[in-house]
Amino acid sequence: MKIECLGILTSGGDSPGMNAAVRAVTRTAIYNGMAVKGIMRGYKGLVTGEVEPLHTQNVSNIIQQGGTILKTARCQEFMTAEGRATAYETMRREKIDALVVIGGDGSLTGARIFAQEFDIPIVGIPGTIDNDLFGTDTTIGYDTALNTIMEAVDKIRDTASSHERLFFVEVMGRSAGFLALNGALAVGAEAAIIPEIATEVDQLEELIDNGFRKSKNSSIVLVAESELTGGAMGLAARVKEEYPEYDVRVTILGHIQRGGSPSASDRILASRMGEAAVNALLEGQRNVMVGIQNGELDYVPFAKAIRNIKPIESELLNTVKILSI
Ligand code: F6P
């Protein structure tokens, strides 16, 4: 089937570099003779019919901008069969033959169901700061978020060491500890508390038992925001109760991690993945996510990217521990 018109949307939590990906998809598609339409607010725009033509100049000067010019949303309606049927009507009315979806786990799950129900060619691009998609070493936005964490925690370290305090710094990653673990390495934190091993050990107890802070004038622990870890607030409350000798403070970095101009790595990744997504469709690929493994781009079936849990290198927790003695 010849693709005359390509639709593109960004969905779920935004991530720095999404705009660079929108630019790359738009320009590669136009270069290959397709018309391009931008769907506003993720799947919501497909349901409500908010679709705008994208020309090459519409994506000028966005490679350096955080956020997404297409806006994004987490759309409840698209989770229902009626919502998806309405979305399909929009596709037919707008004569959109194929879709590129930029987003995380939830967005690609929606893409997979939609593609199966209506036999639409869809290619996904992993855009999430969480880096939690299987089949790709990294996702668009992860590197920028890590750098944001690094800059913020470097500042916290100054005050933590002046006051000789223990800081719990909460970072994003609802169900994945990549930001907490690699953030901890990048800032020389004393520990990272991550959801992946939360059910195996009591990480706080282990931390204190290992005698952290004995020879230190400050301690920083990065905590992934997750019910499984208890979050930074939960851990701080426990320390105050169980180990009152520590002077504890909490910083929750929050949505600052999702904003900002994308790093060079994220811009390059987004540009390469954007081009590859259009090439995938031209090659007749469908229901795949573009991934990168050992520097090589690859196509990963949606089913694999979504169903499998991306393994975290939990041995790096030991590296954090060794390097913080
Ligand atoms: O999935 C991306 C993410 O930033 C998570 O790390 C975080 O837990 C969540 O989104 C926050 O979502 P919201 O912006 O809807 O509060």
Image (cartoon, rainbow, N blue to C red):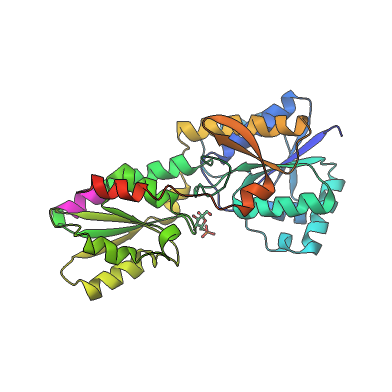
Q: Position of residue 24 (x, y in %)?
A: 63, 31
Q: Position of residue 86 (x, y in %)?
A: 82, 57
Q: Can you see residue 41?
A: no
Check the image and report above or below for 306 versus 244.
Answer: above
Please name the residue shown 78% across and 30% down the image: 34
Q: Is residue 99 left or right of residue 132?
A: right
Front residue (pair 232, 137): 137
Q: Is residue 197 left or right of residue 30?
A: left
Name the quarter where the N terminus is drawn: top right
> What is the number of callouts on the image?
0
Front residue (pair 223, 50): 223
Please name the residue shown 66% across and 31% down the image: 276
Q: Position of residue 277 (x, y in %)?
A: 68, 34
Please name the residue shown 81% across and 45% down the image: 120
Is residue 159 part of the magenta span, yes or no? yes
Q: Which residues are magenta?
A: 156-161
Check the image and report above or below for 19 versus 200.
Answer: above
Residue lying at the far top in this picture: please name it. 31
Is residue 184 part of the magenta span, yes or no? no
Q: Can you see residue 318?
A: yes
Magenta span: helix, strand or loop, mainly? helix
Q: Is residue 199 left or right of residue 306?
A: left
